[in-house]
């Protein structure tokens, strides 16, 4: 049993509002102090979940956070982020700065709903008129390909798809609209039919004790941030169970060895202290704070830093109810949850960048060719931007080993994907120019070693102006 040593810090919402009116949040953007990064300082009255919301804003813009100090004791929240854009540049764009200021304050003001709405708007050209399919199940080669094929058969246009695989679990969120008339699927009969067909595909190869779940959500239901939702789905599907790190000294089983989590309790001060060492990667801070929030922990202090390779995160936390983390079972729950949250996004295999003229069945065709050639998709993040389908696809061999895919095989597969496919080998290839000019007629799949060119963040960037002007009109 956990011992309650502290009162919950949550205050009456009315009081929160009052405090907020007296002390509105402040965002300070400082480009002078450091030569190589922008300092982002935020301070405001505290509120549960505010840290996650703010990190979410920065993460959705693909900003890289190299250092962060967080302090939120006593009803007050202060945070300093050292950030650059994904190319390592300081943030100098006026529109971007304005957007960040407004978005951070908005997340403070209205909670995640506003941020989610905003993201849906900017992201992948998603309007609110989409049906979302949330699918979880046992990971197997070809699963995504079968899902996309069924959706083509059913006449549903996929407008965005995000999927992760981790250990034996797979989770995906697919946004789609009616292929004929557009918009979400409204007819309840049809909705049930689509759901049933998807279930058939996902359940088809379930072994004993393996479960899967398909849920279609309408646009009206308040949607959670997509990646936060993926974390929830994976967790609910039990992908953390194989992350068996019970003890800091124990070398964990395959797949978890790169993340080390240590939990200590400091009874006098009333905190649990969590130290995490892992390979650094984009969105690590978001994933970690997301896990702590989902596990119902509140971060009071944190120091996060990275030297480019290794990230070191230290959190002083308490349970939402005020307790520290002192039972062994609770410790191991938090440990597993954190390790899984950090590991599940680590994409295995080779990343391909997709940029293609969109057409009915494009994703279904691409994923089918991979499957037929013994390649498996370990993660996907694609969307549509106007006429084009853009995004990243990670492929591995069917055994899901973290080995490189045979390049010759890959070449063959890429050729097979379409008659008019232009293949570009790496971003700096001389043929790039000529290929790009042909892109309008075909599909371009690029093998890349560097950071993705497409990302949700990029699309958000392209919408900055519109978003900023929207903010203008709601300003209080
Ligand atoms: C569905 O996708 C196809 C191919 O991209 C497009 O031609 C069609 O207009 C789309 N349907 C709607 C309603 O947008
Ligand atoms: C970062 O730190 C780790 C361990 O603390 C070290 O092994 C690694 O070489 C460092 N990397 C850089 C780029 O300094």
Image: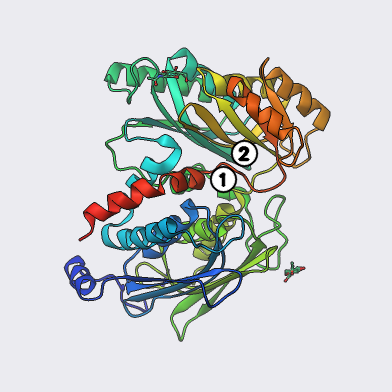
Residue 243 to residue 167: above or below: below
Residue 139 to residue 63: above or below: above
Residue 192 marker: none
Query: Is ligand 2 within 8 Å of the beta carbon of the residue shown at mark 1?
Result: no
Q: Residue 181 location, x and y as percent? A: 33, 17
Residue 17 to residue 174: above or below: below
- Visual colour scheme: rainbow
Q: Quadrant of the C terminus?
A: bottom left
Does residue 177 appear anywhere in the picture?
Answer: yes
Q: Quadrant of the N terminus?
A: bottom left
Q: Residues within 10 Å of mark 1 (few under 14, many from 20)?
A: many
Task: Out of 314 and 36, give the one closest to the viewer.
Answer: 36
| Residue with the mark numbered 2 | 168
Ligand 1's image quarter is top left
Q: Secondary structure at mark 2?
A: loop
Q: Residue 347 location, x and y as percent? A: 64, 44
| Residue with the mark numbered 1 | 239
Residue 180 to residue 277: above or below: above
Q: Secondary structure at mark 1?
A: helix
Query: Is ligand 2 within 8 Å of the beta carbon of the residue shown at mark 2?
Result: no
Left or right of 291? Residue 190 is left
Does residue 376 appear anywhere in the picture?
Answer: no
Looking at the image, the residue that sits furthest to the bottom is 268
Q: Residue at x 46, y 77 (%)?
A: 271
Q: Residue at x 29, y 43 (%)?
A: 222
Quadrant hosting residue 139:
top right
Quadrant hosting residue 251:
bottom right
Q: Residue 448 location, x and y as percent? A: 70, 41
Label 1 close to label 2 by CB (< 8 Å): yes
């Amino acid at each position: 049993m956990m011992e309650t040593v502290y009162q919950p810090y949550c205050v009456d919402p009315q009081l929160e509002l009052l405090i907020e009116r007296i002390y509105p949040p402040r965002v300070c953007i400082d480009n002078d102090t450091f030569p190589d990064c922008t300092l982002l300082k935020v301070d405001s009255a505290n509120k549960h979940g505010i840290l996650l919301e703010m990190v979410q804003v920065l993460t959705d813009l693909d900003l890289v956070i190299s250092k962060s100090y967080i302090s939120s004791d006593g009803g007050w929240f202060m945070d300093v982020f050292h950030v650059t854009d994904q190319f390592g540049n300081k943030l100098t764009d006026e529109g971007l700065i304005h957007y960040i200021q407004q978005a951070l304050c908005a997340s403070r003001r209205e909670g995640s709903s506003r941020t989610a709405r905003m993201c849906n708007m900017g992201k992948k050209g998603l309007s609110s008129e989409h049906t979302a399919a949330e699918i979880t199940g046992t990971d197997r080669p070809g699963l995504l390909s079968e899902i996309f094929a069924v959706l083509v058969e059913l006449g549903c246009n996929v407008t965005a798809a995000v999927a992760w695989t981790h250990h034996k679990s797979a989770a995906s969120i697919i946004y789609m609209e009616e292929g004929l008339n557009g918009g979400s699927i409204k007819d309840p009969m049809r909705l049930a039919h689509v759901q049933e067909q998807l279930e058939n595909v996902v359940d088809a190869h379930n072994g004993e004790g393996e479960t899967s779940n398909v849920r279609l959500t309408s646009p009206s239901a308040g949607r959670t941030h997509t990646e936060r939702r993926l974390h929830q789905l994976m967790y609910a599907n039990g992908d953390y169970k194989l992350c068996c790190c019970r003890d800091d000294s124990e070398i964990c089983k395959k797949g978890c060895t790169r993340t080390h989590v240590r939990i200590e309790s400091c009874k006098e001060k009333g905190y649990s202290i969590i130290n995490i060492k892992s390979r650094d990667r984009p969105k690590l801070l978001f994933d970690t704070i997301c896990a702590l929030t989902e596990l119902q922990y509140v971060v009071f202090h944190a120091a996060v830093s990275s030297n480019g390779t290794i990230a070191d995160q230290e959190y002083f936390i308490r349970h939402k109810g005020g307790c520290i983390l002192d039972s062994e079972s609770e410790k191991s729950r938090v440990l597993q949850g954190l390790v899984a949250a950090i590991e599940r996004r680590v994409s295995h295999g080779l990343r391909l960048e997709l940029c293609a003229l969109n057409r009915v069945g494009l994703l279904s065709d691409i994923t089918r060719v991979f499957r037929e050639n013994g390649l498996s998709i370990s993660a996907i993040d694609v969307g549509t931007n106007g006429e084009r389908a853009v995004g990243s696809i990670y492929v591995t061999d069917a055994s899901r080993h973290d080995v490189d895919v045979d390049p010759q095989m890959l070449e063959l597969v890429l050729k097979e994907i379409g008659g008019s496919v232009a293949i570009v080998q790496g971003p700096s290839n001389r043929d790039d120019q000529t290929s790009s000019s042909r892109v309008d007629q075909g599909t371009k799949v690029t093998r890349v070693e560097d950071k993705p060119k497409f990302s949700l963040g990029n699309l958000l960037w392209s919408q900055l102006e519109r978003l900023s002007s929207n903010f203008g009109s709601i300003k209080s």
